[in-house]
C-alpha cells in the first residue's frame, strides 16, 4: 500500500527534532485523528537554512514531515511557501488517497512556520491559497 520511499522516510525520518532558537515555528493538528505536527525553521537572508520537525502521528504524517523538511531546505521563503502537499506526496512516490490529508499537515505546518517568522519580523502573514487541497472535505477522517 505504501511506496518504498514512504516506508524509508517513515522508518528513517530525516530532520527529526527541534531547532534551538528557531526563526519560525508552526504547529498544526488534525482534530479528527488527533495527530500533531510541529515544524521548526531556521531562516537566514530569506533562505530556509534548516528545517526540523516533531510529529506525533501516523506513518504517512511522519514520512510527509520528513520529506517536506528535506524539500524546503535551501529554498527561499517564497519557494518554500509554494511547496504543496501534492508535491510532498509526489516526492514520496505517492500516498494512498485516504492518506493524502496527512500530507496537508506538512504544507500547513510549513505555512504556519513561515508566517510565524513573517509576523515576528513585522511583515504581513501570507494568505493560504484555496489551491490548498482539502480534497477529502473539511473534516478528513483519519484512518490509522
Ligand atoms: Fe492523522 Fe495521518 S495525519 S492519520
Image: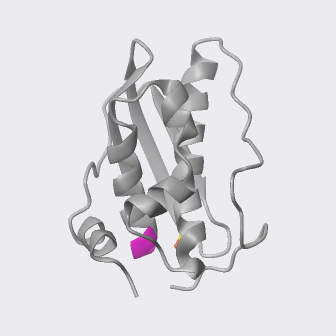
Residue 32 spot, x, y in % from top left: 67, 74
Residue 102 spot, x, y in % from top left: 54, 67
Q: Is residue 67 visible?
A: yes
- Which region is colored magenta? 56-60
Quadrant containing ligand 1 reads: bottom right
- Classify the position of the N terminus by image quarter: bottom left
Report if residue 99 lies within the magenta region. Answer: no
Q: Is residue 120 above or below residue 31?
A: above
Residue sitting nearer the eye, 94 or 7: 94
Looking at the image, which residue is at 34% across and 55% down? 66
Residue 122 spot, x, y in % from top left: 65, 11
Report if residue 58 lies within the magenta region. Answer: yes
Residue sitting nearer the eye, 95 or 114: 95
Instruction: Find residue 45 and report its image quarter.
Output: top left
Q: Is residue 52 above or below residue 118?
A: below
Residue 84 spot, x, y in % from top left: 56, 49
Q: Is residue 57 visible?
A: no
Is residue 75 toward the left or the right of residue 144 in the image? left
Is residue 64 toward the left or the right of residue 13 in the image? right
Instruction: Find residue 9 and report its image quarter.
Output: bottom left
Q: Which residue reaches farthest left? A: 12
Looking at the image, which residue is at 60% across and 76% down? 33
Amino acid at each position: 500500500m505504501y511506496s518504498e520511499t514512504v516506508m524509508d522516510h517513515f522508518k528513517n525520518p530525516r530532520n527529526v527534532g527541534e531547532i534551538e532558537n528557531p526563526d519560525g515555528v508552526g504547529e498544526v493538528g488534525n482534530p479528527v485523528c488527533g495527530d500533531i505536527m510541529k515544524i521548526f525553521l531556521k531562516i537566514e537572508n530569506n533562505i530556509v537554512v534548516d528545517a526540523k520537525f516533531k510529529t506525533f502521528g501516523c506513518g504517512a504524517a511522519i514520512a510527509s514531515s520528513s520529506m517536506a523538511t528535506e524539500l524546503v531546505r535551501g529554498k527561499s521563503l517564497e519557494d518554500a511557501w509554494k511547496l504543496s502537499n501534492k508535491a510532498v506526496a509526489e516526492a514520496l512516490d505517492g500516498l494512498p488517497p485516504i492518506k493524502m490529508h496527512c500530507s496537508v499537515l506538512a504544507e500547513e505546518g510549513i505555512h504556519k512556520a513561515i508566517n510565524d517568522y513573517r509576523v515576528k519580523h513585522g511583515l504581513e502573514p501570507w494568505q493560504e491559497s484555496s489551491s490548498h487541497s482539502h480534497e477529502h472535505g473539511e473534516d478528513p477522517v483519519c484512518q490509522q
